[in-house]
Amino acid sequence: MNRLISAACLAALALAAGPAAAQDPNFTRNLAATCAPCHGTNGKAIPGAGQVPLAGEAQETIASRLHEFRAGTRPATIMHQIAKGYTDEQIKQLAAWFAAQKK
Amino acid sequence: MLNRRDFIKTLGATAGVATLGGCAGGASKARGHVVVVGGGYGGATAAKYLRLWSNGSVDVTLIERNTEFISCPISNLVISGDKALADITVSYEGLRKWGVRVVHDSVLGIDAEKRTIKLEKGGEINYDRAILSPGVDFLWDQVPALKSADAQAKILHAWKAGPQTVALRKQLEDLKDGGVYALTIPKAPYRCPPGPYERISVIADYFKRHKPKSKVIALDANPEVTSKKGLFTKAWDELYKGIVDYRPNSELRDVDVANRTAILEFDKVKADVLNVVPPQRAGDIVAKSGAKLANGRWAEVDWLSLESVNAKGIHILGDSTLSAPLMPKSGFMANQHGKVAAAAILNLLAGEAPNPEPFMTNTCYSFVDAKNVIHVASVHRYDAEKKTLIVVPGASGVSAQRNEIEAAYAIGWAKNIWADALA
């Protein structure tokens, strides 16, 4: 049964994330958690603290910002350095994950 | 601009994530009891995320001797008089709301075979997996005159935030204008690489504003500034000419406590306020646990799970670890260790292997005066061949120049990371 659930999760992930093979079912959740010290647990930043909240933002907005930071075309203090840490696929996964979180 | 193909992909991705949330990967299958020793940046984060990611299916006990969390990051601003201790203090009540059993006690020992932890007051507790996140302890043998508690109350370290932070602030307030503050910096690695340089900067700023005839002397055991060198030295040249006297290759040998004098190999430096950051190693409980230490100092861990390479079932986080390449001993990094360990432990408790591709990020903000900040940042990913985390090529850097925008971000970061760990 557990194996079946895992298989279902992996299948869902394959649909969500494309052809990534043998990725941990919680890969994206874990990757997104690296952002939380600035952007809040599950992307819910403390209002007014200065950092942009990510939870519930449009997937397209998050992805395009990360691409622009990575390309150096969007002004940044720090995100132009951090965004270079992620592949196109990972940016897509992060954007989808944060977009799916409740605001 | 969303074309139809992308729109369908978007839908698919969102639906996929929702489905995954529903079955929650391996996390919901995890059962067991995890005991976390040390409620700092690493341990508190691990405790919360074990509860969050298991949907409460895993029992978590946090052992912490202090009744409140006091942050080392931002504590230099308490020393400079720009913040109060209350501003950097956070309650453990938030973790209790997550269902973490928070116990204020000290750990006497851990038995990796029997999987038990012995407490000073609370007897023995069993665990399925243990996390040790005790931070650092000091190598007083390398500063012999400071071995006694009495000496340590006079010559402060203030390298663990709390009473020492307040006491150092008091010494600086009592200093007469024209007095000398000297800080000794140990050879790397030590907790918070930019911390000593931030400290001398914000104390110089305090002097400049309130005691302009006073001086700051930095006695650095390292051959050069170990973090954000260009930005710090530029700040000292431009803001604190005649105030900051930075001396590299100046390793402390001992201290003359009564005369507040730092004893170096070929020199003695007398100060009115002498502040010694001693050499450090993994926290005592890590040394007692039987975990393998590199050079008798730092715990060697499997970076997929933060489990000790030899003491099975014991995961070690934060400053106590033998750092991966270019990985600082920082609160941010301890937070990231806590999450990689939490995810790995939930997989292991569910009978599955840890995530083979962990990521970690780091950002350290440093104040160079009360209003201006500089950062260093990096993204690290696991390299299966090297069996460690490496910086993703290109994904690191420092501030272009000191600036006020990042001072706001630094305070915002502190609020967010405290909430991420403790609320």
Image: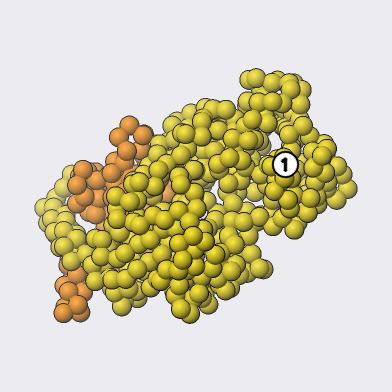
Chain colours: A orange, B yellow
Query: Where the N terminus of chain B falls, by quadrant?
Result: top left
Please tell me whether residue B205 is drawn above or below residue B415 in the rendered image.
Answer: above
Nearest to the observer: residue B170 or residue B182: B170
Q: Using the rendered image of the protein, determine whether residue B280 is visible from the camera's viewpoint.
A: yes
Would you say B46 lies left or right of B161 here? Answer: left
The residue that appears at 55% across and 70% down in the rendered structure is B289
- Secondary structure beneath dot 1 equals loop
The residue that appears at 56% across and 60% down in the rendered structure is B320
Q: Chain of mark 1?
A: B
Would you say B305 lies left or right of B202 here? Answer: left
> Which residue lies under the disc numbered 1?
B155
The residue that appears at 49% across and 60% down in the rendered structure is B121
x, y percent for residue B4: 11, 53
Nearest to the observer: residue B229 or residue B138: B138
Q: Using the rendered image of the protein, determine whether residue B380 is visible from the camera's viewpoint.
A: no
Would you say B84 lies left or right of A6 here? Answer: right
x, y percent for residue B423: 34, 46
Q: Residues within 10 Å of mark 1 (few under 14, many from 20)?
A: many
The residue that appears at 31% across and 41% down in the rendered structure is A45
Quarter of the rendering containing residue B267: top right
x, y percent for residue A38: 38, 44
Q: What type is the residue that disc 1 sits on?
A: Ile
